[in-house]
Image (cartoon, rainbow, N blue to C red):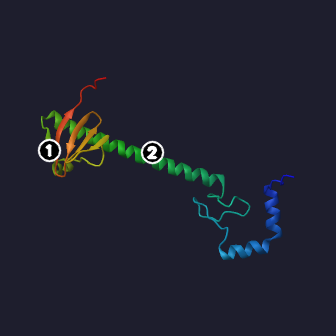
Amino acid sequence: MPEKRKTFSDIRRFLRKNEHLCRTMEEEGFFISHCLECGDEIAYGKRSDSKFCCDRCRHRWHYRSRVGMLRSKERQERCLEKNYEILLSIYESGLRSIDLPKLTAMGFRSEFASTVVRGRTSLLMTCYDISYKMSDTKVFGIRKDLEKKG
C-alpha cells in the first residue's frame, strides 16, 4: 500500500507533539535557517532548504538582484560606447597607433571590448566596428571596418 503523502498540517501536528525535541534541536543549531532578505529566522513547517521567510522577501531579493544585474550591464555598455568614441576620434584624426598611457588618460578602459582574440605578442580586439591590436604599452593597427562582406 502506498505511503500517505505528508501535508503541511501533518508537519505542524508533528512539531506540536515533539516541541521538546524541536527546542533541543534549535539549541544545538539544527534546522535553523535565516531569510536572505531580512535575516529573520525561517519558521518551522517550511521546507528545510527555504531561503526566504515569506513571498514578500523572496520578491524583494530577486528584484534587487535583477536591478543590480541591469545596472552592471548598463555600465559595461557605457564603457564600450566611450571606448568607441575615443577610438573613432583617434581614427578620424589619422592616427593608427597610440601609447596606452595616453589612451588611458583620455578615459579609455582597455578591459572593455566587444571581442578579444589572443595572438602571440598582442591582443586583437574590436570595439563594435573598430578593430585594433594592443600590446602591453601600445595600441596599434587601428582600423574601421566600414562594411562587413557577406
Q: Looking at numbered disc 1 in the image, what kind of residue is underneath it?
A: Ile
x 81%, y 53%: residue: 5
Q: CA distance from mark 2 to mark 1?
A: 33 Å
Q: Which residue is mark 2?
A: 70
Which element type, helix, strand or loop, lies under badge 1?
strand
Write the residue at 57% across / 60% down. 36
Residue drawn 12% across the image and 34% down it: 94
Quadrant of res 57: bottom right
Query: Based on the displayed image, in which of its 4 quarters is residue 32 positioned?
Result: bottom right
Q: Secondary structure at mark 2?
A: helix
Badge 2: residue crowd in 10 Å (few <14, some 14–19, many ≥20) = few
Q: Nearer the viewer, residue 56 or 143?
A: 143
Identify whether 4 is placed above or below 26. Answer: above
Number of residues whose C-alpha sits closer than 10 Å to that of mark 1, classed few (under 14), some (14–19) or many (20 or more):
some
Q: Position of residue 64 (x, y in %)?
A: 52, 51
Please tell me which residue is depicted at 16% across the width and 33% down the height of the picture: 92
Establish if 88 lies above or below 24.
above
Which label lies toward us, 2 or 1? 1
Q: Earlier in the sequence, mark 2 or mark 1?
A: 2
Work out whether residue 37 or residue 49 is closer to the camera in this orientation and state it: 49
Asked if residue 107 lies left or right of residue 49, the reply is left
Q: Position of residue 111 (x, y in %)?
A: 29, 49
How many numbered discs sit on the rendered protein? 2
**Image quadrant assignment for residue 8:** bottom right
Residue identified by numbered label 1: 98
For residue 44, side relative to residue 35 (left or right)? right
Image x and y of residue 27, in percent = 68, 76
Q: Residue furthest left?
A: 94
**17 with respect to 66 (left or right):** right
The front one of 124 and 145 is: 124
